[in-house]
Amino acid sequence: MDVAAQLAQRFCDLATEANEAFMENTRIGYLAAAEKAKEAAVAADLGGAHAAECHRLLADCLIRLGNMADAARAACSSLQAARASGNRSFLVMALGVCGAVAKQEPDEMAKAEKESREQERLGGSPSYDGLDLSQEGRIILPTTLADLSRLDLIYYEAAVAICDAALTAAGGRGSAADDDEMRVPSLVLEAEARGDLGLSLHLLRSEGQRGLDLTRQAVVLLRKAVRTPAPAPSPPL
């Protein structure tokens, strides 16, 4: 096995161990998953979707451990990597975890976003593979305390907008064979995005009818996902 293959296998093993530890739903499990996710992120210079998933999982672990400052930075790293991957599914997931951090600690999330954008500015524009997602999922950072309290809503809006744009560009969801996640996020991911936005609107007591409509859309999508035969399993990242 050559070096590249060894590194890829090492990443897959660590990512699997991290997910298994995360599923324990215990503090010890989250701590173990966080360490494995960190190791997987540096196991090889894989970038793109691999890095997006590692940092997203790390952010999820840190949220559950109450370390919101580091969770915000990990969420931003996931967002950066998702754009570079050219995969809208990873971008929707990254925006979702950014929203989850922003819901609890909007000031930490805004601070991490500013740091991330400054790093991007100093490091130059990354090269993008597949779809050019360099501007997709971009949000306008709040400038007032009132807007800051709605930061999670801004991330969730971006995730739903990506789903809508992807469906429009693809001319609808199409057949199962054509439903490439680089083009159109899966039913479950779209349902999560719409559900997150609907719940956020409900909690903010804003746009009540729209929030209800989004929640209903999420339920319809989840029901459809349950009825849709599962695709053949993809090889691990």
Image: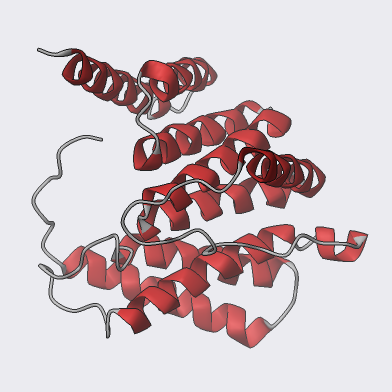
Residue 237, placed above or below residue 195: above
Q: Residue at x 82, y 46 (%)?
A: 107
| Way the structure is coloured | secondary structure
Residue 35, placed above or below residue 22: above
**Observer able to see residue 139:** yes
- Comparing 202 with 182, the one in front is 182
Where does residue 36 sit, x and y in percent of width and height? 42, 17
Q: Quadrant of the C terminus?
A: top left
Where does residue 183 sit, x and y in percent of width and height? 29, 67
Residue 3, placed above or below residue 41: above
Q: How many labels does the image show?
A: 0
Q: Residue at x 65, y 35 (%)?
A: 73
Judged left or right of residue 1, residue 18 is: right
Judged left or right of residue 147, residue 109 is: left
Q: Which residue is drawn at 44% across and 48% down?
A: 127
Q: Which residue is drawn at 20% across and 13% down?
A: 3
Where does residue 153 sit, x and y in percent of width and height? 67, 65
**Observer able to see residue 194:** no
Where does residue 143 sit, x and y in percent of width and height? 88, 62
